[in-house]
Amino acid sequence: MSSRKVLTLTLVRNSVGDILLGLKKRGFGEGKWNGFGGKVEPGESILQGAARELTEECGLKAHSLTKVGLLDFDFIDDPMRLEVHVFCTSDYSGTVIETEEMKPKWYKVEDIPFHEMWLDDPIWFSWYLKGGPQFKGYFLYKGLDKIVEQEVKSTDVPRETTSCT
Ligand SMILES: CNc1ncnc2c1ncn2[C@@H]1O[C@H](COP(=O)(O)OP(=O)(O)OP(=O)(O)O)[C@@H](O)[C@H]1O
């Protein structure tokens, strides 16, 4: 019997095109730079979960979120699949703050620290950056440091922006 965990991941870009990443200070992915996100809680929508995690982890309030892709992760010898819903936004307010979970930092696109991120990030990030329809990715990990199967492709579903209010 396999089960899945629904997670969100949000990438924030400011008016000059820089990307906000956070250094995860604890838990799954500790020591890695990533977008902001976490588990969707019972009773909330995926969008609500994404907006809540963004505020909890870096202080920003998203006014709208754009769905850009979906990533499925399997791990050999672990029946739990991670289903990561990827969003982006440039429509937010608030001040970026460091939290117990994340140390945020703005990066120029050409300086994104892929060598300090999940191994899958450099593979699907280009799909996010180039725009176009939503992407769909699949990665099979052996442990946390090796990808043994991977596929990222475009869907025919356009990116969809939804208001968070
Ligand atoms: C395997 N390859 C991966 N590549 C890129 N990103 C990945 C990822 N695997 C998980 N992620 C993201 O990492 C965060 C974990 O969040 P995670 O700490 O587990 O959730 P949450 O904050 O709810 O946890 P706690 O409340 O501390 O238990 C969450 O954004 C999730 O989308």
Image: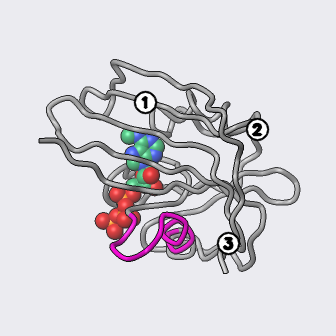
- Residue at the spot of label 1: 138
The residue carrying mark 1 has its beta carbon less than 8 Å from ligand 1: no
Name the foreground residue: 59 vs 104.
59
Q: Is residue 74 left or right of residue 98?
A: left
Dot label at residue 62: 3
Task: Name the residue tied to disc 2.
Answer: 131
Q: Amino acid at mark 1?
A: Tyr
**Is 51 inside the magenta-drawn segment?**
yes
Q: Earlier in the sequence, mark 1 or mark 3?
A: 3
Q: Regarding mark 3 in the picture, which secondary structure is present there? A: strand
Q: Residue furthest top?
A: 148
**Is residue 111 something that shows in the picture?**
no
Q: How many marks?
A: 3
**Depicted 52 relative to depicted 40: above or below:** below
Q: Mark 2–mark 1 contact, CB under 8 Å?
A: no
Identify the magenta region: 40-53
Query: Do residues under tags 1 and 3 come within 8 Å of each other at their CB atoms?
Result: no
Disc 1 is placed on an element classified as strand
- What's under tag 3, amino acid-wise? Ala
Labels 2 and 3: the sequence-earlier one: 3
Give coordinates of residue 104: x percent, y percent. 59, 62
Q: Can see residue 117?
A: yes
Kind of residue indicated by mark 2: Gly
Compute the Cα span from label 1 to label 3: 27 Å
**How busy is the neighbourhood of tag 2: few (under 14 within 10 Å), some, or many (20 plus)?**
few
Q: Earlier in the sequence, mark 2 or mark 1?
A: 2
